[in-house]
Image (spheres, grey):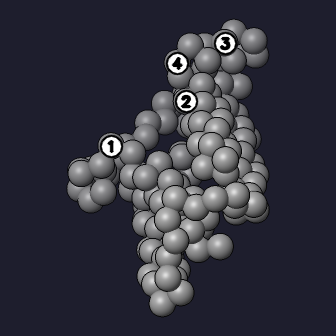
Amino acid sequence: MSATYCFILWTICGLQHSLMARPFFKKIIKDLFDRNFEKYFYTFIHFISQCIIFILIYDLIRNLKTIGYFYSISPDKEICIYFLNRIANIFLIITVFHFDIGIFTGITQLKKFFTKLGANNEMTQVIDKTYLYRYIRHPMYLGIILVYITSKLFI
């Protein structure tokens, strides 16, 4: 049963992200507010909401009571899961360095809005495709899933 809850929670996290990243949703935001809100504030709000959802779901998954096991890990192998969890966390951190963190988090857009620097310039996000993104389309998603899985296994 806990695997079902994990799957449902992962799905909620993915749906929230996918919905907010879609052009039709951004158009709704632009129509409800204005172009400046969508251009300067939306990315930051999207990023913060993803952080909140990630932390809530991560905490819920870590605290699920396990009813049954698909398999068990011998105590001498638990150290392997521990290190896999650490590697998954490092992998997740590395994915962030593939793009401009300021644009990714929306901080650059907020700074431009409040300082009026480059107000007419478009901000574009360029992903560095020389490392992880060269081999994996969504390495950050993979990192998040690996962190979830190894966290639950480690507990």
What residue is at 75 percent from the left and 12 percent from the top?
Answer: 32
Q: Residue 45, how many percent across, how many down?
A: 71, 38
- Callout in the foreground (3, 1): 1
The residue identified by callout 3 is 28
Q: Indicate the secondary structure of the residue bearing disc 4.
A: helix
Q: CA distance from mark 1 to mark 2?
A: 15 Å
Q: Indicate the secondary structure of the residue bearing disc 1.
A: loop
1 and 57: which one is in front?
1
Amino acid at the residue labelled 1? Arg
**Looking at the rendered structure, which numbered label has been put on residue 18?**
2
What residue is at 23 percent from the left and 56 percent from the top?
Answer: 130
* Mark closer to the chain start, 3 or 2: 2
What residue is at 56 percent from the left and 52 percent from the top?
Answer: 102
**Looking at the rendered structure, which numbered label has been put on residue 23?**
4
Indicate left or right for 62 with 152 as reference.
right
Q: How many marks?
A: 4
Q: Residue 10, how many percent across, how many down?
A: 60, 43
Q: CA distance from mark 3 to mark 4?
A: 9 Å
Q: Hey, which residue is sitting farthest bottom in the picture?
A: 76
94 and 32: which one is in front?
94
Q: Hey, which residue is sitting farthest top in the picture?
A: 31
From the viewer's perspective, is residue 155 above or below residue 16? below
* Mark closer to the chain start, 1 or 4: 4
Q: CA distance from mark 3 to mark 1?
A: 27 Å
Amino acid at the residue labelled 2? Ser
From the viewer's perspective, is residue 2 above or below residue 65? above
* Mark closer to the chain start, 2 or 4: 2
